[in-house]
Amino acid sequence: MSAIHVDADACPAPIREILLRAAVRSGVALVFVANRPLRLPRGVEMVVVPGGPDAADRHIAASVQPGDLVVTADIPLAAQAVARGALALDPRGTLYTEDNIGERLATRDLLAGLREQGTIRGGGSAPGRRERQAFAAALDRWLARRSA
């Protein structure tokens, strides 16, 4: 049975709420992974990993199974999930698949290089209403395919 693995260290609260409601509605297993405990409703699994860079990412990458969904803004983690037969969903509603993950990794690497050079600064803003709606719609599509 498929599950949703959440890279919870950077998961925005509104996205977490969407995930919790969807898990209750659909009965899908929901696993939050972070460096610190989060307040979650009873019945939702919380995995606290030791601190350190990418500890949550490593745990998720090792745990994900084909057919699972990984919720993360971390494109390298999304690529690892896709390589293991899962899908990955960005908190802004972008679904990462075998068809698009290579391009997303290349874009990420280009932007990281430009940031290192000082050509561009900063990252993105928190997901707005439109992005939250796109996330919820993509999550609903994944849940519908899972139950079909």
Image (tube, rainbow, N blue to C red):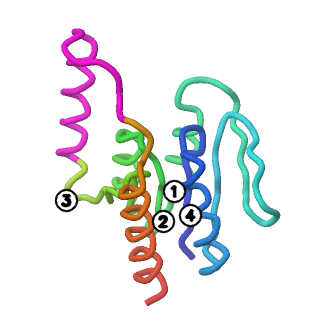
| CA distance for labels 1 and 2 | 6 Å
Q: What separation in Å lies between label 1 and label 3 (alpha carbons)?
A: 19 Å
Q: Which residues are magenta?
A: 102-124
Amino acid bearing label 3: Asp
| Residues at discs 1 and 2 in contact (Cβ within 8 Å) | yes
Q: CA distance from mark 3 to mark 4?
A: 26 Å
Q: Amino acid at mark 1?
A: Val
* Residue assigned mark 4: 18
Which residue is tagged 3?
99
Residue pointed to by mark 1: 64
Say if mark 4 contacts mark 2, CB within 8 Å: no
Q: Contact, CB < 8 Å: mark 3 with mark 4?
A: no
Q: What residue is drawn where x is 60% and y is 49%?
A: 13
Q: Position of residue 96 (x, y in %)?
A: 31, 56
Q: Is residue 106 magenta?
A: yes
Q: Is residue 96 left or right of residue 33?
A: left
Comes first in the chain, label 4 or label 2: 4
Residue 68 has which mark?
A: 2
105 part of magenta stretch: yes
Please state if 100 lies on the left or on the right of 24 as rendered.
left
Lower sequence index among marks 3 and 4: 4
Which mark is nearer the camera, 1 or 3?
3
Mark 4 or 2, which is nearer the eye? 4
29, above or below 95, in the image: below
Counting residues from the start of the chain, the first of labels 1 and 3 encountered is 1
* Label 4 – label 2 distance at C-alpha: 17 Å
Q: Position of residue 77 (x, y in %)?
A: 42, 43
Q: Position of residue 83 (x, y in %)?
A: 34, 53
